[in-house]
């Protein structure tokens, strides 16, 4: 048994610990391609709205933007006639 940090283990405890053995199964450190694809597909996606705080002025701009686009297009169409 290895001793960490040069700590002294009493001989009685060392003898008792040597009586027990543990079988450790092999651990696969490399994932298969299918596991990697599955992890990629199931990874949570960050919410882009978390970075920006939604304020009342932003909501107003979002609601009025389509109206402004329609007005600009219709005014441009009238000028071209």
Image (cartoon, rainbow, N blue to C red):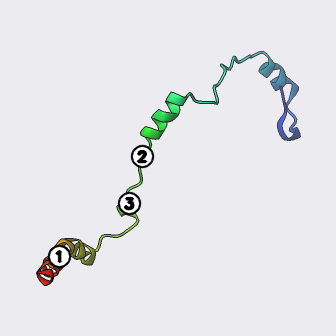
In the image, residue 67 sits, relative to residue 48, either above or below, namely below
Instruction: Count neighbours of disc 3 (C-alpha within 10 A) and say few if under 14, some if 14 to 19, many if 20 or more.
Output: few
Question: Which residue has dot 2 on it?
Answer: 44
Residue closest to the eye, 9 or 52: 52
Q: Position of residue 58 (x, y in %)?
A: 27, 74
Going from N to C along the chain, the mark reached first, 1 or 2, is: 2
Residue closest to the eye, 44 or 15: 44
Residue closest to the eye, 45 or 12: 45
Question: Which residue has dot 1 on it?
Answer: 73
Residue under the image location 28 percent in, 74 percent down: 55
Q: Which mark is residue 48?
A: 3
As measured in the structure, the alpha-carbon distance from the residue carrying label 2 to the one carrying label 3 is 12 Å
As measured in the structure, the alpha-carbon distance from the residue carrying label 1 to the one carrying label 2 is 40 Å
Q: Quadrant of the N terminus?
A: top right
In the image, residue 51 sits, relative to residue 80, either above or below, namely above
Res 80 quadrant in image: bottom left
Q: Give the foreground label among 3 and 1.
A: 1
The residue at the far bottom in this view is: 79
Res 20 quadrant in image: top right
Does the residue at mark 3 contact the one at mark 1 (Cβ under 8 Å)? no
Residue under the image location 38 percent in, 56 percent down: 47
Instruction: Count neighbours of disc 1 (C-alpha within 10 A) and say few if under 14, some if 14 to 19, many if 20 or more.
Output: few
Going from N to C along the chain, the mark reached first, 3 or 1, is: 3
Instruction: Count neighbours of disc 2 (C-alpha within 10 A) and say few if under 14, some if 14 to 19, many if 20 or more.
Output: few
In what element is the residue under mark 3?
helix
In what element is the residue under mark 1?
helix
């Amino acid at each position: 048994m290895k001793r960490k940090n040069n700590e002294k283990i009493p001989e009685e405890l060392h003898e008792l610990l040597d009586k027990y053995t543990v079988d450790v199964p092999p651990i696969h450190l490399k994932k298969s391609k299918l596991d990697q694809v599955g992890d990629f597909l199931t990874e949570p996606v960050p919410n882009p709205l978390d970075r920006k705080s939604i304020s009342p002025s932003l909501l107003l701009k979002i609601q009025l933007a389509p109206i402004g686009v329609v007005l600009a297009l219709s005014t441009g169409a009238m000028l071209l006639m």
